[in-house]
Amino acid sequence: MKVIFKVYTYLKAELGAGEICLEFPDKEVVSLEDVLNEVEKLTSKKIKDKVLKNGKIKEGLIFVLNGKSVIPENASQVLLKDGDIISILPPGSGG
Amino acid sequence: MEAIFTRHLPLIGEDGLKKLLNSTVLVAGAGGLGTVVLQILVRSGVGIIYVIDHGIVDEPDLNRQILYNRTHLGKAKVEIVSEELRKIRDVEIIPRKETIDENFKIPDEVDIVVDCLDNFYGKFLLNDLCVTANKPFVHAGISGFYGQVTIVIPGETLNLKEMLRNVPLEKTGGLPVIATAPFILGTLEANEVIKFLTGKGVLLKNKILVVDLLYNDFQTVEFGSL
């Protein structure tokens, strides 16, 4: 299975890439943590601890899975399947 | 017709200009985003503009709040905005020096509301008020060198809090910001208002346009429809 992982603004700068196609050859579903582990493996950049804390999405970050904003408390239960797109963005609050 | 409109009249036509001249827009916040949005809407031909802001002009505002200068320090922003915008053309500006809270009533004649507030508490509250009043709402937020913009149309799109879950609901602003961020994001907000009022182009319905000015990146994040 394949999953598209996207990040924006400062997360993109830290990761050095805005979009990564992740492959999980022997799986039918993966967790968000699996996705982040794979991103760390491919990029050699620490990202998991910057976006998750105790299985919950860190405040100030928006996870969008296939067009739906993920409920922060549900992050550890989210499962991704082949073709899913997960995006992480940090919206600005200023005016 | 006023000569100020001659350069964009061919783009929107007599009908489009008439729509702008007959429109009423409420701009919430007269800071970095708001002063850019207001200038563009006035120059484009919007007929009546409500401006809501409780603040006074402070020196740190001058790096980005384009309608103000040193002679305005200490004065109410809504009063300066009214004076400065009327130097551009004869336009009806309705300044209201107040804070938007749960009791704020969006005037019935308002066609669209523009969120130029500086915190998510206010942005979400204003969006809720717009949903209750069935008014379209253009949102932008900025931080550092980046920002985002979208439009919320009750009954047609997701609300702001359905798209932006998990943001801190603080009531105060003051984040570091580069001058280019409100200029560009404010311009995109005004562009969304002009498209909505004239019926031109494609709106950012269920899409957030994310702008990263450090890396020259403009990308939309798509959300599912209702």
Image (cartoon, rainbow, N blue to C red):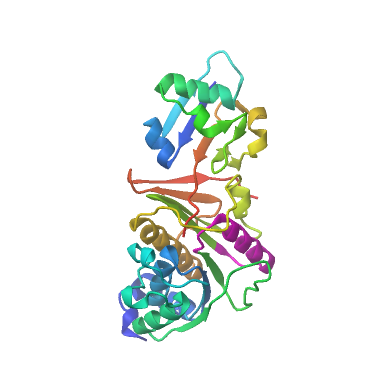
Q: Position of residue B6 (x, y in %)?
A: 31, 79
Q: Along the horizontal axis of the image, is B9 left or right of A65?
A: left
Residue B217 found in image quarter: top left
Residue A88 or B59: which is nearer the viewer?
Answer: B59
- With respect to residue A88, does B177 lie above or below? below
- With respect to residue A92, does A2 lie above or below? above
Q: Along the horizontal axis of the image, is B2 left or right of B141?
A: left
Q: Position of residue B159 (x, y in %)?
A: 62, 55
Which residue lies at the image location 47% right of the left edge and 77% below the top edge?
Answer: B78
Main secondary structure of the magenta stretch: helix
Q: Position of residue B143 (x, y in %)?
A: 43, 51
Outermost residue toward the top in this view: A26
Residue B200 can be seen, yes or no: no
How many numbered marks, from 0 up? 0
Residue B18 or A47: which is nearer the viewer?
Answer: A47
Magenta run includes residue B23: no
Which residue lies at the image location 56% right of the left edge and 13% below the top edge?
Answer: A26
- With respect to residue B175, does B105 lie above or below? below
Which residue lies at the image location 46% right of the left edge and 65% below the top edge?
Answer: B195
Residue A12 found in image quarter: top left
Give the magenta-colored segment's residue range: B116-137
Residue B1 or B150: which is nearer the viewer?
Answer: B150
Q: Along the horizontal axis of the image, is B148 left or right of A68?
A: left
- With respect to residue A37, does B160 lie above or below? below
Residue A11 found in image quarter: top left
Which image quadrant: the N terminus of chain A? top right
Which residue lies at the image location 54% right of the left edge and 44% below the top edge?
Answer: A60
Residue B97 can be seen, yes or no: yes
